[in-house]
Amino acid sequence: MIQLRKFKQLAALALIGLLTSWMVSCVSKPPLPPTPTIEFWTMQLKPQFIDYFQSLIANFESQNPGIKVNWQDIPWSAMENKILTAVSANTPPDVVNLNPDFASQLAGRNAWLDLDTKVPNEVRSSYLPNIWKASTLNGKSFGVPWYLTTRLTIYNTDLLKQAGITKVPSTYAELAQAAQQIKDKTGKYAFFVTFVPQDSGEVMESLVQMGVTLVNTEGKAAFNSPQGKAAFQYWVDMYKKGLLPKEALTQGHRHAIDLYQAGETAFLASGPEFLKTIANNAPKVAQASAIAPQLTGDTGKKNVAVMNIVIPRATKYPDEAVKFALFVTNDENQLAFAKAANVLPSTVKALSDSYFKDVPATASTVEKARVISTKQLQQAEILTPTLKDFNKLQKAIYENLQAAMLGEKSVDKAVEDAAQEWNNR
């Protein structure tokens, strides 16, 4: 009996010990950390590129099993307000597709991660040097370059024949002459360009192409100059002569595409990515369309538009976000996206691929555009300066240009007022 009682006591003590050990292990064992989920925002890339991004994300997750990616696509018109709200509320996504002009405004508020400490020099050197500079402000890198476009002149051969034009304009001076001839012979417009602030920067770039310096090294207005006044006068004359549609003051760049597709304009200054859009929406116009290098001024300068990727400073997963941003923009993925979207890559290796150099003798307009765009990229540059208040500079110039076009101010007064508004902001 005594032995049986001792056995029961020992068994009970052993059970208590096991239970205690189990409870201690449960309490002391730290919970598993949550799987990092990268919130990735792109700008107006759905639904056309759903398959591409689903495959891209699946490949990244398979190579990085501890990281998940949640992709959201934001309409172009909504992105600015949405990212501003998210950054202000300290609830931003982790990786965002923007462009340097807008991203630089928030870079001035220290909203983005400093990538100079996160991206090794050997990785950085894989991107085109001048394109990397587009996402720098005050000597600091705030973005990684992604895809590029250079403007082309898409033109309607039928309208040019009707107007008796045999040479496609290559400069703004030649465009003015062609515009008058097209209006006289066909009653239609040569082209459409917008003067709406916060929309296309094409007019801003045209000033630089005409020899205007927008700001000096101190950031003060430099366009109150003979070159600046001549450039303002050019656009005022085009409008007052009726060679620009009245909607140039109220409609954005999308209207330029609509007018061209409707056969109402002879020229469309746009990227080659719109050739497929025209083919889908206006097959007859597309059939009559051909391409030429982009218009420029006496300087011969040509633009390149950059889309980049930025990482908010408030991200919870900076290292994972940088890893994903560099994955999206590496040589292999840039080349694949360039082929899918008819754009140009921003890495040296991807751009050297034969896809951008060799086309068959029977090449389509889209294929020819790809080669012309690539050749232009060798001389192309970011024409407008990276400024945290660039939107205010564009607003000052566009609004005063509009006033001169409507006859509310002289050209000299419009230039002077725009410079004063910028300097006194």
Image (tube, helix red, strand yellow):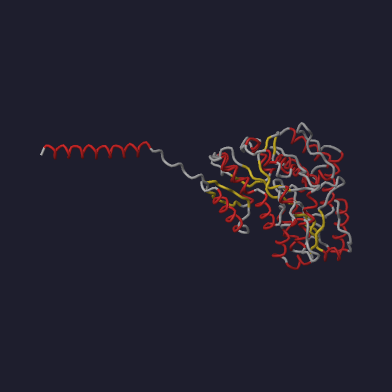
- How many marks are shown on the rendered structure? 0
Residue 209, how many percent across, how many down? 82, 45
Outermost residue on the front side: it is: 3
Asked whether 344 or 16 is in front, the reply is: 16
Relative placement, left or right, of 168 versus 254 is right
Q: Is residue 232 above or below residue 44?
A: above
Q: Is residue 338 above or below residue 301?
A: below
Residue 30, how many percent across, how many down? 41, 38
Q: Is residue 183 above or below residue 203?
A: below
Asked whether 278 or 50 is in front, the reply is: 50
Asked whether 356 or 138 is in front, the reply is: 356
Asked whether 62 or 281 is in front, the reply is: 62
Quadrant containing the N terminus is: top left
Outermost residue on the left side: it is: 1
Quadrant containing the C terminus is: top right
Q: Residue at x 88, y 59 (%)?
A: 167
Residue 172, how many percent across, how many down? 85, 51
Q: Quadrant of residue 227?
A: top right
Relative placement, left or right, of 38 versus 163 is left
Q: Quadrant of residue 258?
A: bottom right
Outermost residue on the bottom side: it is: 284
Residue 408, how many percent across, how many down? 79, 44
